[in-house]
Amino acid sequence: MSDPLIEVDGVGRDYGTGDRTVHAVREVSFEAARGELVAVRGRSGAGKTTLLNMIGGLDRPTRGVVRVAGVDVTSANEAQLLDLRRSTIGFVFQSFGLIPILSAAENVSVPLRLNRRPAAEREERVQLLLELVGLGGQAAQRPGELSGGQQQRVAVARALANDPPLLIADEPTGQLDSETGRSIMDLLRALVDARGMTALVATHDPSLIDRADRVLTLRDGRLA
C-alpha cells in the first residue's frame, strides 16, 4: 500500500499489572490508505475503542508504533498530539458529545474558534458543513431540539470543521435506530468518496459493514 495515512505496527495495550493485567489490544498491525473507509468490527470488549483511541492519540500503546499522516503518534508529546487532533483528525463518538447550551452552528464552530479562524470565515464554513450533512435549516437549534440522528450529523459536521484527512468514528450509530444508523453510515461513505478523506469506523452492527472498503475484525484484542 503506497502512502498509507494510518500505519499501525505491533500495537498492544495493557491495563493493570501482574495477575490483574488486562490485554485490551494484542499485537495489532495494519495500514489504511488515503480515501479508504475501514470498518473495525467486534463484540463489546473486543478492543475497538482502545485501538481507535491509540490511533487518535487519546491513549498510548504499551508497545508498538502508530503513525498518522507520517507523525509518530506513540512518541509525540502533548503539544504535538493536540496539534494532530486539531488539524489532522476529526472525532465522532457514540454519545454525540455536543455542548447542550450551544446551537448546532455554534457546536460546529468550536474547532474553528480553537484554531482562531476569522469570524466571517467561520460562519461561511459552518453553514457549508451543515448543508453538507443535510441540516442547513437547523443551524439555530440546540441539541435537545434535535433527533438523535440530527445530533450525530451535527457531530459529523463538527468533526469536519478543520477539513481533517482522517475521521475516526467510534460506534457512531450505537445510540440510533437501524434506519437512522444506516443513513449516518451512508453519509460517512459519501464524505469519503467526495472528499478523499480516510474514515476509520468502529461498529458491531453487521448491517453497516457493507458500506466499508475493508473490514477489520477484532476478537479478544487481536485481529482475526
Image (cartoon, rainbow, N blue to C red):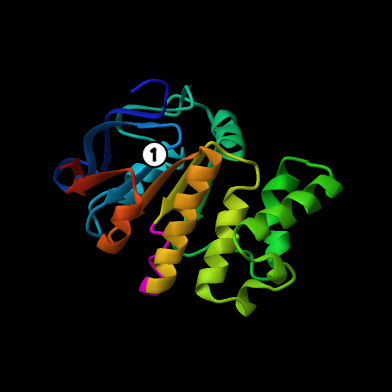
Q: Quadrant of the C terminus?
A: top left
Q: 44 or 2, which is in the foreground?
A: 2
For label 1, the crowd category at 10 Å Cα-Cα, with few meaning under 14, some 14 to 19 and many 20 or more, is: many
Residue farthest bottom in this picture: 145
- Magenta part mainly helix, strand or loop? loop
Percent from the top left, x then y, of residue 66? Answer: 38, 29
Three-letter amino acid code at disc 1? Met
Q: Is residue 110 left or right of residue 59?
A: right
> Which residue is under mark 1?
54
Q: Secondary structure at mark 1?
A: helix
**Residue 143: percent from the left, percent from the top?**
62, 72
Residue 176 shows up from this direction: no
Instruction: Tell me which segment is drawn in magenta.
Output: 171-178
Q: Is residue 22 visible?
A: yes
Identity of the residue drawn at 38% across and 20% down: 2
Compared to residue 120, the image places residue 62 above or below, namely above
Q: Quadrant of the N terminus?
A: top left
Q: Is 116 within the magenta?
A: no
From this view, report whether residue 190 is shown above or below residue 82.
below
Residue in the picture at 27% in, 49% down: 47
Inspect the magenta stretch and tell me whether residue 176 lies in it.
Answer: yes
User: Taking 3 as reference, is 79 above or below it?
Assistant: below
On the image, the x and y values in percent for residue 171 come to 38, 58
- Position of 208 with respect to 106 (left or right) is left
Residue 56 is left or right of residue 161, and the answer is: left
User: Residue 19, how many percent across, how many down?
Assistant: 13, 45
